[in-house]
């Protein structure tokens, strides 16, 4: 738990008056000046667009150390969890704070099975979307619709397992159904006999006419990819879930908002953008240098997608694991992807370039995950949906933590008003 250092630990001079502010410290040793009293005592606000220097909450769920390239979920390094756990175990860990016992794991899996179907009336929604609807649009709308089918969501704090398994299980089913709808194939129902990730791959890729066999190595890869995304501090979508939740909005509404934030190309939408960028390079003859030059040109809007991170100023540990997963998938399926060679060349050239070095820009999680999804057979527009499924346990855990935190108030940032202070009113009939 954060604790206060001997006060007064920080002093600020405003208009000649010295204001004393307490300093709090977290378990990783990060310190923060607690400015909550600043406006009351000194009538001054703090300005921080993008909240890069602002702590919005206390959280015990995950730690991102951007200097060391370290990611912990409830104290466990991401490397340990991807190596030894299933995604379902990690989801339990994030939501409950500890890994499940055998009995707890069985109960959680049983609940996941029980809640895997979607209401027949909801299934009709899929028919109404245009054929080329982006699956993220469908996913977000379906998730918020769940609140009308399961209104008891208001009381879920009493049984988080039911709410969590319902969402985890149904999100996966909705994702697979929306894909099947987009390719005009009949949906495959979830099976009680299959694990979470096996079920998902089966719902995605099995079809009446194919003989789809679920390879255990690919199920493991799917688990690992989901685990990589399961939580990541107060990132944009998680902060969105918390902001919406802070108004008292229900879990489904809050998570729908998180899905929409994740869709952005600077956030989870980057995995789709990375593969589209690599495809363009491939189509145009493999000229990596042009893409790097364009990303460095401040007059052009393009960035090197899958590179850079607000917190990591060294290699993103998730990118290193994703790169390894990519290689393992290729070995398993016995096929290479020319996009992987382009990605490796792009990475090597960018890391050797002073522009990227000076700004400490390294590959992030999205750089290699898209290539892994491609190798598993997912179409490009499903990549961000996969990120959303992976991030779901983190969103649920953060929403729950917010609800239990006595310090939390409705999220409500301040602004610096730049509009006019007095505008002369002209009646409509006299306006030009
Ligand atoms: N390509 C080229 N230049 C970049 C890039 C990039 N990918 N990322 C940052 N920069 C430059 C930026 O132009 C700025 O330069 P200068 O100091 O000359 O103005 C400097 O680096 C700092 O960038 P910033 O925009 O202030 O950094 P930020 O912390 O606000 O943005 C980011 C972080 C992830 C949005 C950004 O690095 C980016 O746009 N990356 C590409 C999109 C991407 O891969 N997003 C996935 C992020 S990881 C998964 C997730 O959490 O969603």
Image (spheres, rainbow, N blue to C red):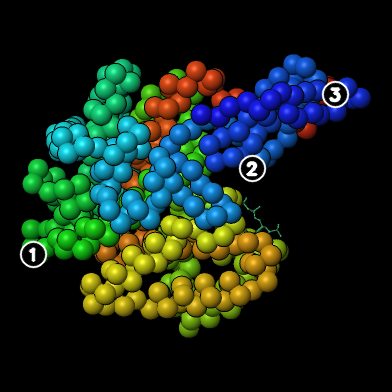
Mark 3 vs 1, N-terminal side: 3
Measuring from the top left, give residue 273's x and y in whole percent: 47, 61
| The image quadrant in which ligand 1 is located | bottom right
Residue on which disc 1 sits: 211
The secondary structure type at the circle numbered 1 is loop
The secondary structure type at the circle numbered 3 is strand
Report how far apart the C-alphas of labels 3 and 1 lie in the structure: 74 Å
Ligand 1 contact, mark 3 (Cβ < 8 Å): no
Q: Residues within 10 Å of mark 2 (few under 14, many from 20)?
A: few
Residue on which disc 2 sits: 52
Report how far apart the C-alphas of labels 1 and 2 lie in the structure: 50 Å
Q: Residue furthest bottom?
A: 285
Which quadrant of the view contains residue 94?
top left
Mark 3 vs 2, N-terminal side: 3
Q: Residue furthest front?
A: 6
Q: Residue at x 19, y 34 (%)?
A: 104
Quick check: 134 left or right of 10? left
Ligand 1 contact, mark 2 (Cβ < 8 Å): yes
* Residue 303 circle label: none
The secondary structure type at the circle numbered 2 is loop
Q: Is residue 170 in view from this perspective? A: no
Q: Is residue 205 above or below residue 126?
A: below
Residue on which disc 3 sits: 18
Q: Is residue 81 in view from this perspective? A: yes
Q: Residue at x 45, y 61 (%)?
A: 319
Measuring from the top left, give residue 56's x and y in whole percent: 57, 31
Asked if the residue at tag 1 contacts the one at tag 3, i.e. Cβ–Cβ closer than 8 Å, the answer is no
Quick check: 390 left or right of 427? left
Quick check: 403 left or right of 337? right
Q: Residue at x 31, y 78 (%)?
A: 336
């Amino acid at each position: 738990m954060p604790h206060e250092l001997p006060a007064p630990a920080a002093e600020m001079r405003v208009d000649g008056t010295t204001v004393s502010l307490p300093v709090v410290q977290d378990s990783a040793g990060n310190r923060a000046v607690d400015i909550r009293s600043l406006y009351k005592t000194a009538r001054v606000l703090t300005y921080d667009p993008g909240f890069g220097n602002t702590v919005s909450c206390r959280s015990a769920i995950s730690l991102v150390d951007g200097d060391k390239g370290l990611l912990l979920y409830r104290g466990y390094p991401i490397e340990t969890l991807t190596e030894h756990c299933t995604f379902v175990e990690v989801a339990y860990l994030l939501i409950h704070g500890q890994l499940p016992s055998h009995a707890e794991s069985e109960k959680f899996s049983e609940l996941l099975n029980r809640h895997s179907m979607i209401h027949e009336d909801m299934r009709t929604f899929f028919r109404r979307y245009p054929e080329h609807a982006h699956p993220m649009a469908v996913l977000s709308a379906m998730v918020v619709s769940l609140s009308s089918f399961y209104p008891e969501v208001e009381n879920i704090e009493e049984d988080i397992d039911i709410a969590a398994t319902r969402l985890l299980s149904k999100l996966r089913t909705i994702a697979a159904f929306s894909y099947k709808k987009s390719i005009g194939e009949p949906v495959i129902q979830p099976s009680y006999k299959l694990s979470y990730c096996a079920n998902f791959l089966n719902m995605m890729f099995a079809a009446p006419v194919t003989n789809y066999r679920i390879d255990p190595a690919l199920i493991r890869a799917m688990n690992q990819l989901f685990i990589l995304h399961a939580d990541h501090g107060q990132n944009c979508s998680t902060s969105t879930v918390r902001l919406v939740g802070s108004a008292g909005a229900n879990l489904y509404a809050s998570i729908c908002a998180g899905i929409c934030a994740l869709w952005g190309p600077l956030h989870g939408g980057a995995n789709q953008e990375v593969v589209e960028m690599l495809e363009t390079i491939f189509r145009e003859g493999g000229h990596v240098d042009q893409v790097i030059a364009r990303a460095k040109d401040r007059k052009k809007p393009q960035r090197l997608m899958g590179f850079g991170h607000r917190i990591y100023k060294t290699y993103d540990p998730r990118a290193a694991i994703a790169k390894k997963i990519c290689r393992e998938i290729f070995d398993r399926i016995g096929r290479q992807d020319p996009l992987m060679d382009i990605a490796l060349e792009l990475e090597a050239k960018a890391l050797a370039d002073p522009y990227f070095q000076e700004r400490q820009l390294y590959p992030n999680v999205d750089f290699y995950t898209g290539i892994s999804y491609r190798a598993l057979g997912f179409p490009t527009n499903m990549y961000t949906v996969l990120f959303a499924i992976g991030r779901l346990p983190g969103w649920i855990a953060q929403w729950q933590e917010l609800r239990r935190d006595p310090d939390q108030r409705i999220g409500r940032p301040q602004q610096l008003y730049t509009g006019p202070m007095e505008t002369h009113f002209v009646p409509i009939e006299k306006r030009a």
